[in-house]
Image (cartoon, rainbow, N blue to C red):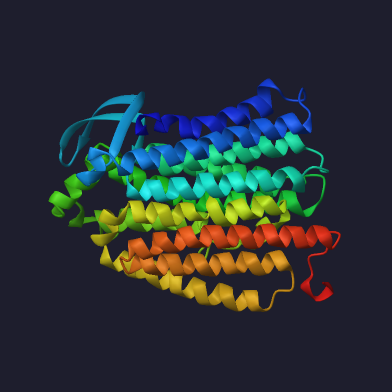
Amino acid sequence: MHELVWLIPVLPLLGALLNGVVLKGRLGKNAVAWVACGLVGLAALLALLVIGGYLGSPEHAAHQPFERDYYTWMPAGAITTPDGVKDLTVSVGFLVDPLSCVMLFVVTFVGFLIHLYSVGYMAHEDGFQRYFTYLNLFMGAMLLLVLGNNYAVLFVGWEGVGLCSYLLIGFYFKQDFPPYAGRKAFLVNRIGDFAFVVGLFALVSSFGTLKFTELFPRIAANPALVQGSYVLGLSLASFVTLCLFIGATGKSAQIPLFVWLPDAMAGPTPVSALIHAATMVTAGVYMVARSNVLYQLAPEISQLVAVIGAATALFAATIGLAQTDIKKVLAYSTVSQLGYMFLAAGLAAYSAAVFHLMTHAFFKALLFLGSGSVIHAMGGEQDMRKM
């Protein structure tokens, strides 16, 4: 069954294509909801089948991932690296292993519940079809991110969730503040993404591949490949992990690039639940956990990850104590909880970080959806002092 893994990101993307392009303006709200929720529900069901199939497979018994390339994206040709001349080819492929299984379950299951909640919550809003187009696109991008078998596919999903966050945070574009909040999220994330790309270029120039199953075994078998001096007095491992972590601070709202997340509350409440629980902010933690081979060979950067995580956890929780807006309290709570995840990852407790990620996804999604019900019942009031 895990051979059908390619369908999981395709189904939400198909929903976005149908609602946003093919059937735009031709469907009633009920039909829009059926298309959007039905395809995400199918993706969630298929994800459970893929996870079950992998856990019972010979690959899992042998502690090996299931991996398949589906399309050669960029056959770039020969590239000269310190390790010799390599044939650089970037493929679109997916990988199923225990880490991607956890993320797959979280993204599809929590995302499906948020889609269902959105049907009632957004029923009286203009732009109902546009909303579900963006939501499906968001899900598809996040699934590309967690299932990609190389950093290139991961980065496409990474940029996709960044774009969708801009579209969803600025959903109420006729008001003054939401478009500003969307632009702020977009620009802050571009700062982190620039560093992320620099780190990927360093990996390509040194190894001629971005594929996890080629890159990490080579590094683990010969750590000296990444421990020599590279640039700015840093080893290759330290430079790459620092660049990747700067990208993660933008996506997962850590000091100093956390400033966009509280303003992300300008979007509809289900969007806040999706961004803060199942998708965007979990991407940075997932990426650090996925790159654990590199981080273990860069102890000083791992220490930096732990220090930034601990500082963010304390700093954001302190700010959250003084908030009166119910959604702002939850926003700063999210920043703080992500700090704990990075603290665990920086201490090489990757299992603890991913376990916290999973549990946080469920309880934070429930808190946001519960706050949305309260706000609706209070006629749109978000100030807790007036409730």
Which residue: 27% across, 55% down? Answer: 294
Rendered location of residue 12, percent (x, y): 56, 34
Please give left or right for residue 65 compared with residue 265 in the image.
left
Which quadrant of the figure has residue 245? bottom left
Q: Nearer the viewer, residue 261 or 142?
A: 142
Q: Is residue 27 above or below residue 186?
A: above
Which quadrant of the figure has residue 22? top right
Which residue: 41% across, 53% down? Answer: 286
Rendered location of residue 144, percent (x, y): 46, 38
Which residue: 29% across, 68% down? Answer: 300
Please give left or right for residue 169 compared with residue 62 in the image.
right
Q: Nearer the viewer, residue 307 or 50?
A: 50
Mark yes or no: residue 255 visible: no
Q: Is residue 178 above or below residue 86?
A: below
Classify the position of the N terminus by image quarter.
top left
Please give left or right for residue 266 compared with residue 290 in the image.
right
Mark yes or no: residue 239 visible: yes
Classify the position of the C terminus by image quarter.
bottom right
Q: Is residue 115 above or below residue 42?
A: below
Number of numbered markers = 0
Which quadrant of the figure has residue 139? top right
Which residue: 53% across, 37% down? Answer: 140
Please give left or right for residue 248 compared with residue 270 in the image.
left
Rendered location of residue 238, percent (x, y): 29, 59
Q: Nearer the viewer, residue 21 or 209?
A: 21
